[in-house]
């Protein structure tokens, strides 16, 4: 039997062949033509909207809009990837990502606003959560990715900016879903800022922005984003009128909408963008007296450390005000007079009203609300100077012990007969004996004669503990140094809670020493 053999060296070179009949020549010509076509297709240009899942050898011409670091806060801020947003000539937004082990190769080439040709990358399905674009696919750089900056503008222009602004009603519908991270633009009405020199992460900025539709929204920035805002504000030299904040995470807490910053959040003032400039130019000229201060900084306070004794003494003579302090203290017990949790609304976290056979949420105006277990833990604390009671709610406790209340206990029954099947979780009992730095928010409630606890807004780990402040020591008196023996996970974001619940005095019989837990129905508010 005759056997025809083919020896193919390179697709773009002449094909050497041995064949026995003329028909094989036709087959080889067809095969060579197809191979040549594949090579041409591999070098062709592709639009972002035409990407398919898998390895892409085509070339995309894109503009890099923004990039940022994605870090794992649970692993000490370990770098996971460099994430970015691309746009092409059709204004298609697509998210890109460079893994941590490849970021050194590309990092120096990343310039926001620059044009690039991109080829040899992987195309994967977009994460359905925390989406920055509507594209179903995203780009990932691999070992063969070519990423080259273009110095000339393309024939078809590529937009220099693209934002995903959404109306207020849509922001409300996205709240607490974790689905989308929209952008926001509004007129700056107020800046509330708290800073500290003692803990690197204890920074917070709250911006009140008035949307074009007239609603006011609160944008919350924490830690590095708060510092970035202050740095930008200082370099800008004046207070902006229009602010654009990108990639915010809408949350509803206590019935209020908060737009929390994320790692992908960028800030733009006034005329720094075309979108902002269009609104800025339409604003009426401020008719106020030039000699008057028009500052929108309504509260800029430096958070100072205090001992427990100084905290108690500060409350007594002070005028009513909203102020924050840091206090390093050891948890000596858990007060169980009113339990360690409450039944809250799954939507707004407010305490539910118990009916005969259902729960009612007054805040949401829902007569058949869905119940969710929430932390409300009163801790007895002490340092070398005094004792006090600190009250921590759901977000702070979940961050501290790394587990949700609904995961450690269950609600038994419904309405007035509802109870919890655990007296106190071991994870809460385990914090007794440990020392933490607490950030305390004192409100009007704390300046009344009935105050008995201080509301915790954040809890910091051992490595960030603030130093004990200096204070006068009478002759013959010694105060030992504070010691630290345990750590916890610091909160990533601060949430406003209703602090109107009365505080309880320190009572030894209501405290839980280390290791004592019970599997019996607990007292539940």
Image (cartoon, rainbow, N blue to C red):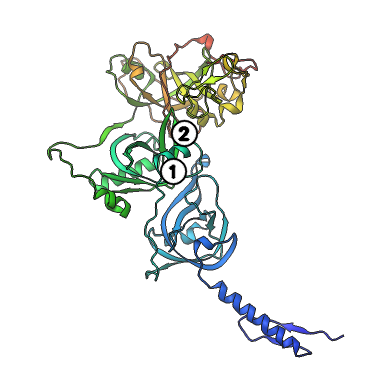
SS under mark 1: loop
The picture quadrant where one finds residue 258 is top left
Quarter holding the N terminus is bottom right
Name the one closer to the observer, 116 or 323.
116
Relative height, residue 276 to residue 322 (above, below): below
Mark 1–mark 2 CB contact (< 8 Å): no
Place of residue 338 in the rendered image (x, y in percent of width and height, measured from the top left): 51, 14
- Gap between marks 1 and 2, in whole Å? 14 Å
| Furthest-right residue in this view | 1
CA neighbours of label 2 inside 10 A, class few (<14), some (14 to 19), many (20+): many
Place of residue 147 in the rendered image (x, y in percent of width and height, measured from the top left): 48, 65
Tell me the tag on residue 491: 2
| Residue plotted at (38% across, 29% down) | 467
Dot 1 or dot 2: first in sequence order is: 1
The picture quadrant where one finds residue 252 is top left
The picture quadrant where one finds residue 15 is bottom right
Relative height, residue 226 to residue 281 (above, below): above
Image depth: mark 1 or mark 2 in front: 1
CA neighbours of label 1 inside 10 A, class few (<14), some (14 to 19), many (20+): some
Horizontal side, residue 232 vs residue 116: left or right: left
Relative height, residue 158 to residue 198 (above, below): below
**Residue 136 visible:** yes
| Residue plotted at (43% across, 45% down) | 182
Tell me the tag on residue 476: none
Place of residue 481 in the rendered image (x, y in percent of width and height, measured from the top left): 41, 24
The residue under label 1 is 262
Name the one closer to the observer, 54 or 435.
54
Place of residue 122 in the rendered image (x, y in percent of width and height, measured from the top left): 57, 60
SS under mark 2: loop
Name the one closer to the observer, 438 or 59.
59
């Amino acid at each position: 039997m005759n056997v025809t053999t083919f020896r193919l060296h390179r697709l773009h070179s002449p094909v050497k062949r041995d064949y026995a009949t003329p028909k094989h020549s036709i087959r080889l010509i067809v095969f060579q033509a197809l191979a040549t076509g594949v090579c041409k297709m591999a070098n062709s240009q592709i639009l972002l909207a035409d990407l398919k899942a898998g390895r892409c050898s085509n070339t995309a011409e894109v503009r890099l809009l923004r990039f940022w670091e994605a870090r794992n806060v649970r692993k000490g801020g370990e770098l996971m990837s460099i994430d970015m947003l691309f746009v092409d000539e059709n204004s298609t937004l697509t998210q890109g990502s460079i893994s941590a082990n490849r970021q050194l190769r590309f990092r120096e080439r990343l310039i926001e606003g620059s044009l690039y040709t991109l080829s040899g990358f992987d195309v994967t399905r977009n994460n359905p959560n925390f989406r920055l674009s509507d594209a179903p696919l995203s780009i990932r750089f691999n070992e063969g990715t070519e990423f080259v900056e273009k110095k000339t503008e393309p024939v078809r222009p590529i937009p220099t900016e693209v934002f995903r602004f959404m109306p207020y009603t849509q922001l409300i519908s996205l709240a607490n879903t974790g689905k989308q991270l929209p952008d926001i633009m509004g007129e700056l009405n107020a800046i509330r800022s708290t800073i500290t020199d003692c803990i690197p992460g204890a920074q917070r900025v709250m911006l009140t922005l008035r949307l074009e539709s007239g609603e006011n929204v609160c944008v919350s920035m924490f830690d590095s984003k708060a510092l970035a805002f202050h740095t930008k504000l200082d370099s800008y030299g004046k207070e902006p009128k229009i602010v654009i904040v990108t990639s915010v995470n809408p949350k509803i807490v206590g019935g209020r909408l908060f737009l929390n910053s994320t790692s992908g959040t960028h800030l733009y003032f006034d005329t720094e963008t075309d979108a902002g400039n269009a609104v800025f130019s339409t604003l009426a000229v401020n008719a106020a007296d030039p000699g008057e201060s028009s500052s929108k900084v309504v509260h800029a306070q430096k958070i100072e450390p205090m001992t427990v004794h100084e905290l108690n003494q500060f409350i007594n003579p002070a005028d009513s005000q909203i102020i924050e302090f840091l206090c390093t203290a050891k948890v000596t017990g858990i007060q169980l007079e009113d339990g360690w949790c409450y039944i809250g609304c799954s939507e707004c976290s407010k305490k539910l009203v118990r009916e005969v056979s259902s729960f009612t949420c007054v805040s949401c105006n829902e007569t058949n609300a869905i119940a969710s277990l929430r932390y409300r833990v009163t801790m007895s604390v002490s340092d070398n100077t005094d004792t006090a009671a600190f009250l921590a709610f759901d977000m702070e406790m979940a961050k501290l012990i790394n587990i949700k209340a609904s995961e450690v206990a269950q609600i038994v029954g419904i309405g007035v007969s509802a109870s919890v099947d655990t007296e106190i979780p071991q994870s809460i009992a385990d914090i007794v004996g440990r020392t933490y730095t607490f950030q305390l928010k004192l409100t009007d409630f704390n300046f009344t004669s009935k105050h008995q606890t201080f509301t915790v807004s954040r809890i910091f780990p051992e490595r960030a503990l603030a130093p004990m402040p200096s204070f006068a020591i009478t002759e013959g008196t010694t105060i030992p140094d504070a010691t630290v023996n345990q750590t916890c996970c610091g909160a990533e974001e601060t949430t406003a809670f209703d602090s109107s619940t009365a505080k309880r005095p320190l009572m030894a019989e209501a405290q839980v020493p280390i290791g004592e837990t019970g599997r019996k129905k607990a007292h539940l508010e």
